[in-house]
Image (cartoon, grey):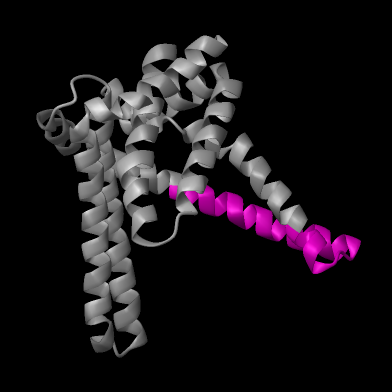
Amino acid sequence: MKPKDFFNLFAAGRGLYKAPAIIAVSLSFWIFLFLLSKLGERIAPSLQTTFANIAWTVFAGLVSLVAASYFFAGLIGMSKGKVKFGEFGKHANKFWFGNFQVILLIILASAIVRLAAHFGALFIGRALGLEVDAALFVFMIIYLAGLVGVLIFLTFSSFFLVVEDLKVRESIRKSIKFVRKNYWETLVLSFALFVLGFLVGRIPGFAGEVLEYALVVPFVVLVLTRFVLLRK
């Protein structure tokens, strides 16, 4: 990819001001999560047992994952073509369950990478007699290797699922193949978007949360969708 094409991806994201529907949908997702959190705070005093707390945590986590699957499937569908609320509903209703499976797979893969980093650092730390800080550094190195060597290949699974109307398994295969072909572009793009999210995330309180869902989330979805459309 030429540098000009790469920066054009970010220029496309500036079109957010022309696509208020995407911002509205993303903010709706934030409102949903906010209300779910407030519901948890409201019922917390009545959760007197460990089982009740675990049950609520599992339920809230599952509801959040389903909501994320639904909203992001719709956002990707809106980003690939006409930015209309109708496109959101059409794609969200069709692809939410497939996207749910993709997200679960990514969570599972992330957990495996984290466990591998944990036990790898523990083994190396004990074998070499490392101090805690040194062992933590080893953990970060192994975990980073897992991110750029494993998880990065799943980056576009949800996007291919929606953009090309694929089954879950095929969308994962397509993402792996796509990242292999565009590895360095994907790595740089992922890092740039991570930095953007990190900087906005440093804004404290209500303003930071609103900016995250009004700016970062729709911007990331727009840029990654356009990247897939440009390079596929």
Q: Residue at x 43, y 23 (%)?
A: 10
Q: Position of residue 191 (x, y in %)?
A: 56, 35
Along the horizontal axis of the image, is 225 left or right of 196?
left
Residue at image location 39% in from the left, 26% down from the top: 223
Q: Position of 226 compared to 143: left or right?
A: left
Asked if residue 31 is positioned above or below residue 220 in the image, the reply reads below
Name the residue: 39% across, 62% down.
205
Q: Nearer the viewer, residue 204 or 156?
A: 204
The chief SS type of the magenta part is helix
Q: Is residue 46 above or below residue 19?
A: below
26 left or right of 102?
left
Q: Residue at x 44, y 60 (%)?
A: 204
Look at the image and tell me in which quarter the N terminus lies: top right
Q: Is residue 117 magenta?
A: yes
Q: Quadrant of residue 150?
A: top right
Region of the chain picked out in magenta, as a range: 107-136
Q: How far from the left and from the top, in percent, is residue 185?
A: 56, 21
Question: Residue 220's image quarter?
Answer: top left
Looking at this view, is 156 or 216 the one in front? 216
Number of on-image labels = 0
Which corner quadrant of the image does residue 123 belong to?
bottom right
Horizontal and vertical percent position of residue 26? 25, 43
Q: Is residue 95 magenta?
A: no
Q: Is residue 210 positioned above or below 14 on the image?
A: below
Q: Is residue 196 visible?
A: yes
